[in-house]
Image (spheres, grey):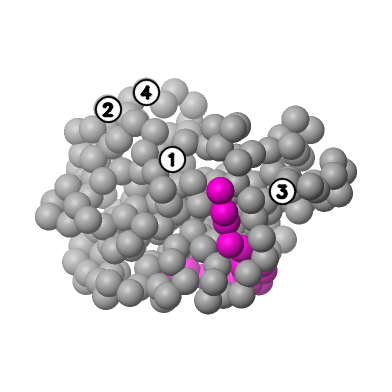
Amino acid sequence: MNTSIAFVEIARTAEVLARMSTPYSMWLSDSEQTRLATLKVEARRDHYLAGHWLVRELLSQAFGEAPLRWSLQERKSLPPRIINGNEKLWVSISHSGDWIAAAVAHVAIGIDIEQRPRQLDASIESLLLNHGEAAGSLGNDALLQRWVAKEAWIKARNESALSERLKQLQLHPATAEYSNVSLYSNDAFHFALAIAPAIAVTWRGKQKMISGQNYCVSE
């Protein structure tokens, strides 16, 4: 993989599952199979399998080798780590509703996706407003955009989206060359990508999105 390129794909979970040509027991690592066994809800299992297969597909495209070549190590509250000689690669996975998203890069990367429409709980508003913004100044969909942008930024730093951390972060519109989070949208979802602005992104898949706001996130 070129060190200045990230690979990203968003797809329907069912579509990714249909592309799995080999039973998951043949390609999940021991730590992944242990994690999968703890997931009792079918939708959660589907998201897990689709996300971890999609990462392998992206790695295959980037390196020109079969998805089965790649082995991932499950990590509690962190994205999986690649464990077959490419430990310095970054991986990020996100899911919402019918959708799964994955990204791989040689640099820090974080992604988040939220299906639309989604009604946020009123208690979340205070965690998403910037200092000085009044309650009620942003509609639900604008708050949802703030949510995915902050989540992506936090994931790129391997942090937890605790309430106090979400509230601490401030989002300011920025030009592309000075942003550290970019927001993309369509009628089905909002998607945020947190990566250094100099990194080129290769989009895989067929989802059409509108490039929305670029943000500079500060603490």
Residue 203's spot in the image, x, y percent? 46, 71
Image: magenta residue range: 201-219
Count of numbered tags: 4
Give the mark nearer the N terminus: 2 vs 3. 2
User: Is 212 inside the magenta-drawn segment?
Assistant: yes
Residue 28's spot in the image, x, y percent? 24, 41
Q: Mark 2 and mark 4 in contact? Answer it, CB < 8 Å.
A: yes
Determine which residue is flagged by label 3.
130
In the image, farthest residue toward the left: 85
Looking at the image, is mark 1 or mark 2 nearer the viewer? Answer: 1
How far apart are labels 2 and 4 at the CA level?
A: 7 Å
**x 37%, y 23%: residue:** 38
Q: Secondary structure at mark 3?
A: loop
Determine which residue is flagged by label 2.
34
Which numbered circle lies on residue 159?
1
Horizontal side of 163 relative to 57 (left or right) equals right
Work out whether 51 lies above or below 58. above
Q: Secondary structure at mark 2?
A: helix
Determine which residue is flagged by label 4.
38
Residue 31's spot in the image, x, y percent? 23, 33
Question: How dense is the environment of label 2, judged by Cα within 10 Å: few (below 14), some, or many (20 and up)?
Answer: few
Looking at the image, is mark 4 or mark 3 nearer the viewer? Answer: 3
Dot 3 amino acid type: Asn
Q: Secondary structure at mark 4?
A: loop
**x 64%, y 39%: residue:** 167
Question: How dense is the environment of label 3, judged by Cα within 10 Å: few (below 14), some, or many (20 and up)?
Answer: some
Give the mark nearer the N terminus: 3 vs 1. 3
Give the mark nearer the N terminus: 4 vs 3. 4
Looking at the image, is mark 3 or mark 1 nearer the viewer? Answer: 3
Q: Would residue 173 be seen by someone viewing this image from the given angle?
A: yes
